[in-house]
Image: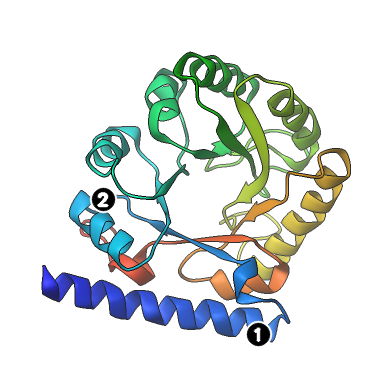
Amino acid sequence: MTDRKDELAANLAKVEERIAAACAAAGRGRDEVTLIVVTKTYPASDVRILSELGVRHVAENRDQDAAPKAAECSDLPLTWHFVGQLQTNKVRSVAGYADVVQSVDRDRLVTGLSREAVRAERELGCLIQVALDAGESGRGERGGVAPGGIEELADLVAGSPGLRLGGLMTVAPLTGEYAGRQRAAFERLMDLSTVLRRAHPAANMVSAGMSADLEEAVAAGATHVRVGTAVLGVRAGLG
């Protein structure tokens, strides 16, 4: 366990250096960017080590993995983010442990999250997932609502009991005009965030950037970056 803690501490320090350097280059304070460590496929023991190392935000993308892990780590001072595509039949479970759902992209999901948040007597932060590969309408390959659908969905979240509209999230698209242009994609998200905040000033979270492109996200103005591999290592079975 000591070896694993040393490994995670070293990786975390490198990621912190990258974020700090990116903030300095962008003329931003380090405190303007929150690191979310994506712990999917890794055990609760790693989550516990990360907490000991000062991590306060963790993310999962599959409820069947996240629910037992969150329960096992319920004594830790962590904020849990759900970042995967969420099926409506998993909403009740996710609403029981997630503090923030970053992948809100359709009306039915908003309705379900609201109902279950009220039932659980909890408030859920919600980010609208934006699909920059979907044109102005439709959905993206990896979920998300097109830019043209943000306003209506945001209004629905803001008016739903038990939910708090937090802001926007995106994943750098693999297809379309922004493929391979992470900085441009994240700048587009920032523009959309500016528009959203005119109607909803408190919705100021912008979640963008992962292990490979966190610098581009920080440069564009992201408030939260989601980093998995760079902290925890390459996941077995991926590729």
In which quadrant of the rendered view does residue 128 lie?
Answer: top right
Percent coordinates x, y for residue 78 in the rendering? 39, 50
- The residue at which mark 1 appears reads as 24
224 lies above or below 74: below
Is 239 on the left or on the right of 124, as rendered? Answer: left
Task: Classify mark 1: residues with Cα within 10 Å, few (<14), some (14-19) or many (20+).
Answer: some
Is 175 on the left or on the right of 231, as rendered? Answer: right
Percent coordinates x, y for residue 234 in the rendering? 28, 66
94 lies above or below 160: below
Answer yes or no: is residue 31 visible: yes
Residue drawn at point x = 65 percent, y = 33 percent: 164
Is 90 on the left or on the right of 69, as rendered? Answer: right
Instruction: Give the secondary structure at mark 2.
Output: loop
Q: How is the image coloured?
A: rainbow
Task: Classify mark 2: residues with Cα within 10 Å, few (<14), some (14-19) or many (20+).
Answer: some
- Which quadrant is home to the N terminus? bottom left
Residue drawn at point x = 51 percent, y = 21 percent: 117
Answer yes or no: is residue 217 visible: no
- The residue at which mark 2 appears reads as 41
Label whose residue precedes the other's in the sequence (1 or 2): 1
Viewer-closest of 139 and 188: 188
Residue drawn at point x = 82 percent, y = 44 percent: 201
Instruction: Give the secondary structure at mark 1.
Output: helix
Q: Which-is-in-front pick, marks 1 and 2?
A: 1
Q: How far apart are marks 1 and 2 (CA)?
A: 32 Å
Residue type, numbered disc 2:
Thr
Viewer-closest of 56 and 61: 56
Single out the residue that lies furthest toward the right. 198
22 lies above or below 143: below
- Which quadrant is home to the C terminus? bottom left
Residue drawn at point x = 34 percent, y = 69 percent: 231
Residue type, numbered disc 1:
Ala
